[in-house]
Amino acid sequence: MSPATKTAPAATPTTTVTALSDPAAEAAIHAACRLLALPTIRAEAIAMAEASAKQRLTHKAFLAEILTAECDERDARRRIRRVNEAKFPRTKRLTEFDHTVLPDLPAPTLAHLAGGGWIDAGQPLVLLGDSGTGKTHLLIALGTAAAEQGRRVRYVTTAALVNELVEASDDKQLSRVVGRYARLDLLCLDEIGYVRLDPRGAELLFQIITAREERASIACASNAPFSEWGATFTDPRLAAAVVDRLTFNAHIIQTGTKSYRLNTTRQTRSRTATN
């Protein structure tokens, strides 16, 4: 190809800016935000633009501020959505838990668990203790912390999960339900040992536990020591297999025998009687 026939390099596109009146600019912002699904920018753009002008921010600084506001709001909505999806029966947080009632569980340990590293590593968490000792509080609080960090969490009692699995099996939807539970980052399984499971229910629950083994975390709470789990799972070999999977590389917390709820009730009544 001769020099005369060489293709000329493409011209570098230039960015053009259209001068708009304030009303037209505001209309364009609202229309674009609706199209791009940017509700926070749509709501805050005008006020933030006026504030930025007063502070003499550069265009880049203003853009950074408003995009950060949108990201922060999306993150907040995502945290709320994750917590709602977890279906916790009530709100419980670690800040509300009196860790002094568990002298063997110092606050730094709770803070470490709240960080969620054990969930990323697929490690189990087992809470053992009598009724009223704070097991469910800790289970919900740690699950809430995990959900607010963006993880997929689901809380369910053992009896409710077994009933769901039995119904799914009867409807030939078992693989779909097992798959849904397997995809969770954290399964919070409460009240193991409260209800004796029939052989079919125990085997179905074992499928969930096996599907998550060494891959995704289960946090569970039980009022029975491991030696008594055979009464729940009826088959000693199945009970041993469940304990083996839930204790391998696990964090095991003993909440003791002293009822926190009963102690609180007694203190309340004592103060009432004194007054």
Image (cartoon, rainbow, N blue to C red):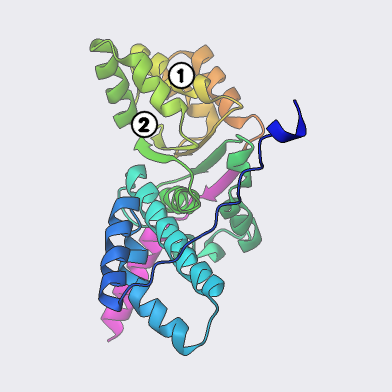
The residue lying toward the viewer, choosing from 242 and 195, is 242
Q: Is residue 272 magenta?
A: yes
Circle 2 sits on which residue?
A: 158
User: What percent of the width, then of the height, locates residue 40?
Assistant: 35, 64
Q: SS at mark 1?
A: helix
Kindly identify which residue carries mark 1. 206
Give coordinates of residue 115: x percent, y percent. 59, 53
In front here: 266 or 202?
202
Q: Which residues are magenta?
A: 251-275
Specify whether 79 is left or right of 100: left
Q: In the rendered structure, which amino acid carries the disc numbered 2?
A: Thr
In percent of the image, x 60 and y 34: which residue is there?
122
Q: Judge whether 126 appears above or below 227 on screen.
A: below
| Residue under the point 32% across and 80% down | 271
Picture quadrant where residue 263 is located: bottom left
**Main SS type for the magenta part?**
helix
Residue 123 x/y as whole percent = 61, 36
